[in-house]
Image (cartoon, grey):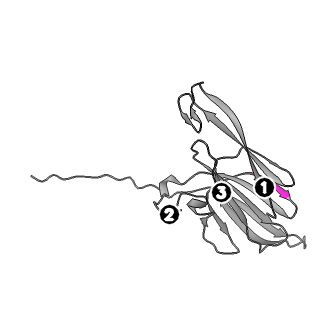
Amino acid sequence: AEEMMVKSMIWPGPYYFSTTAVQLWDVSDREEPEMERELEFEGSYMASRKMGDDVYFVINSYPRWDVLEAGTEEGAVPLYRDDSEEEEFKPTCGCGEVAYFDRDAVTSFVTLASVSMTDPDAEVEKETVAGSAQEVYASQDNFYITEYRYVYWGLPMADGISEDGPSEETVVHKFGMDDG
């Protein structure tokens, strides 16, 4: 007798992700303003700061687990789109270019992007970091992002196993700024 194996499969619906849109408008003619450029970043807007001629954006996002493809950036890193280049979304960076700090595993990303307000054709500078952002502060030379860190009893930490029970701490990450 032959055995018959029946597999059932549930087809996942289309994956939707939220984006943060950045638009640069020329308002020199206030009667008819013109949009010069539009950028979209996958994720949720956290904060922005204007420093000199650049605006810095902080965006939180999560990997798209349902579309991860082994050996590619597809689904792993956040996407962005620049309408001055092309209409398609593409990864903010390669998987090996995601910055990280020596600490516990994280399940989200922070993308920092700077956009020139004076040159609509300037390249958008991007940095994707493993982690999350809760608060933002900017000085003239540095950008600071806080991240809440929760440690549960018995779970591994970067410096050993937590034996003191649950705890919470705030980690401050400092980024240098140099012309965007």
Of badges 1 and 2, nearer the viewer stands: 1
Q: Earlier in the sequence, mark 1 or mark 2?
A: 2
In this picture, residue 24 sits left or right of residue 40: right
Q: Which numbered circle lies on residue 176? A: 1
Viewer-nearest residue: 140 or 63: 140
The disc labelled 1 sits on which kind of residue? Gly
The disc labelled 2 sits on which kind of residue? Thr
Viewer-nearest residue: 94 or 120: 94
Residue bearing mark 2? 72
Q: Earlier in the sequence, mark 2 or mark 3?
A: 2
Q: Residues within 10 Å of mark 3 (few under 14, many from 20)?
A: many
Is 27 rendered above or below residue 42? below
The disc labelled 3 sits on which kind of residue? Thr
Position in image of residue 94 (x %, y %):
58, 63
Position in image of residue 104 (x %, y %):
58, 41
Give me the C-alpha separation between circle 1 and circle 3: 14 Å
Residue under the point 60% across and 49% down: 108
Give me the C-alpha separation between circle 2 and circle 3: 16 Å
Q: Which numbered circle lies on residue 79? A: none
Q: Secondary structure at mark 1?
A: strand
Which of the 4 quarters of the picture holds residue 141?
bottom right
Residue under the point 78% across and 58% down: 56
Viewer-nearest residue: 21 or 71: 71
Magenta segment, prevailing SS (helix, strand or loop): strand
Q: Residues within 10 Å of mark 1 (few under 14, many from 20)?
A: few
Residue bearing mark 3? 128
Q: Secondary structure at mark 3?
A: strand
Boundaries of the magenta span: 46-50
Which of the 4 quarters of the picture holds residue 92?
bottom right
Q: Residues within 10 Å of mark 2 (few under 14, many from 20)?
A: few
